[in-house]
Image (cartoon, rainbow, N blue to C red):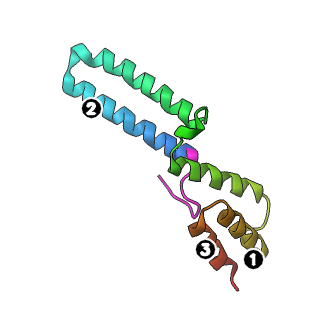
Amino acid sequence: MAQSLFGYSPEQILQARQAAMQERAAAEASRVGGGWAPLFEQARGLSMMGTDVLGRGLFPRAQDPMLQRATTTQGIIQQFQGQDFNDPAVLTRMAQAFSQAGIPDVAMQLGERAGP
């Protein structure tokens, strides 16, 4: 999974979690053996549905901090879409937005890129 200056996207986080769940379910099904495999497949499907529901924000209180940060970051980036990311004024405004959103590490990096 490739991480940018802004971190991982919400989609990347959900895809990685789903892949990990699939790997665990496959390993468990192969370990347990043939008779239980269909049951594990059903459980895996239900688990993935639950992850999708949480990922879509139907239960926002259950959303973990990493996913919340990625969603917030994506929203801030979309606010500045179409602007010149090499312009120090744009970088300064983006840094302010990240700081107000409670993401100080990205705000500091953008501030450094903006210069004095």
Q: Nearer the viewer, mark 3 or mark 1?
A: 3
Task: From the top left corner, tell me how far across and down residue 113 is, in percent.
Answer: 65, 77
**Marks 3 and 2, the one that precedes in the sequence:** 2
Q: Amino acid at mark 2?
A: Ala
Please determine whether, in this image, residue 65 is positioned above or below residue 60.
below
Can residue 86 be seen in this snapshot?
A: no
Q: Which residue is mark 1?
A: 88
Magenta segment = 1-10
Is 34 left or right of 66, judged from the image as shown?
A: left
Is 7 covered by the magenta stretch? yes
Task: From the top left corner, tell me how far across and down residue 102 is, in percent.
Answer: 62, 61
At a point 57% along the width and 53% down the height, the residue shown is 69
Q: Which residue is mark 3?
A: 108
Kind of element beneath mark 3: helix
Dominant SS type (magenta): loop
At a point 62% along the width and 49% down the height, the residue shown is 71
Is 26 left or right of 31, judged from the image as shown?
A: right
At a point 41% along the width and 38% down the height, the residue shown is 19
Please determine whether, in this image, residue 17 is positioned above or below residue 75.
above
The residues tagged by marks 3 and 1 sit, at their Cα atoms, a distance apart of 13 Å
Q: Amino acid at mark 1?
A: Pro
Q: Nearer the viewer, mark 3 or mark 2?
A: 3
At a point 66% along the width and 59% down the height, the residue shown is 101
Q: Amino acid at mark 3?
A: Met
Task: From the top left corner, tell me how far across and down residue 84 is, in percent.
Answer: 77, 67
Count all numbered tags in the image, as a single digit: 3
Location of residue 95 by image quarter: bottom right
The residues tagged by marks 1 and 2 sit, at their Cα atoms, a distance apart of 50 Å
The residues tagged by marks 3 and 2 sit, at their Cα atoms, a distance apart of 42 Å
Task: From the top left corner, tell me how far across and down residue 82 is, in percent.
Answer: 79, 59
